[in-house]
Image: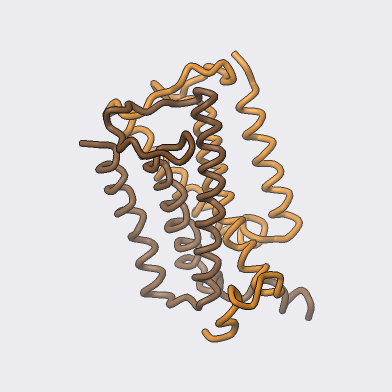
Chain colours: A orange, B brown
Amino acid sequence: MSLLYLTFLLVSLVCMGTIDARFKLFLFRRPRVALPVVVAGFVLFVVWDLVAIATDMYAKGESRAMTGIDVAPHLPIEELVFITFLTYITGVIHFGFLRLLDVGLLPRAVAEGQGKR
Amino acid sequence: MTYAGLVALFLAASAVPFVAAVLLRRPGRRWWAAQGLTLLALGVLTAVFDSLMIAADLFRYEESHLSGLHVWLAPVEDFAWPLAAVMVVPSLTLLLDRTAGDLPARSQEDA
């Protein structure tokens, strides 16, 4: 029983949230849209995991860095936090890049097409 | 069925909001640029952190169901996760909020 992996995930999640809050990128920019989107991504990846577990393709490892709390066979509680993190970081990175393109912090070649909508 | 077969099913499902967003919202080139950059960034993060997670034995795959191709320790099949996330998250956001592909806050914040 260890909180190591769970702590890693939660700290990463909080750091991501801090960046999001500072720059108002995703959840802190349009919460009523971003929240259901994160939920939808969460559902997709949980179902993906459950099917992979049910078909014996994917299994929990024996790392001692986990709490040992499983929400379903082979589905540790940490995996739920990981899935939330993956979905959240995808939104933050996408809108982070949109912002960088907007403020001209990316090379002209990448930002090309600016305003051609 | 191999894991790749399962992956194909979930990628097909993930493509639904993506195709819908592209057809209905017709996002501009900067949205596509952000998508490409996001996929690249998540791909690199997956190569690094999926490998670390496998090295730490946080999870395992039944090797006989895998293609055997790896990037460091990460099975190529695992790169379907960032791909699915990139197809689903920004696309659903764009479908729910048509301004989500527009220029972000600068015009409002600087005004």
Q: Position of residue B63 (x, y in %)?
A: 32, 28
Nearer the observer, B107 or B61: B61
| Spot occupied by residue A104 in the image (x, y as percentages of width and height) | 70, 75
Most extreme residue toward the left is: B1
The structure residue drawn at horizontal position 65% and vertical position 73%, both measured from the top left corner, is A107
Quadrant position of the N terminus of chain A in the picture = top right
B51 displayed left or right of B111: left
Q: Is residue A5 left or right of residue B3?
A: right
Q: Measured from the top left, where is residue B20 in percent x and y? A: 36, 68
Residue B70 percent coordinates (x, y): 41, 38
Number of marks in picture: 0
Q: Is residue A89 above or below residue B21?
A: above
In the image, B52: left or right of B106?
Answer: left
- Quarter of image, res A14: top right
Q: Residue at x 58, y 50 (%)?
A: A89
Question: Which residue appears farthest toward the bottom when viewing the image?
Answer: A116
- B58 shown above or below B1: above
Residue that sits furthest to the right in the current view:
B110
Identify which residue is drawn at 57% across, 42% down. Answer: A85
Q: Name the residue: 65% across, 23% down.
A: A4
Left or right: B86 in relation to B6: right
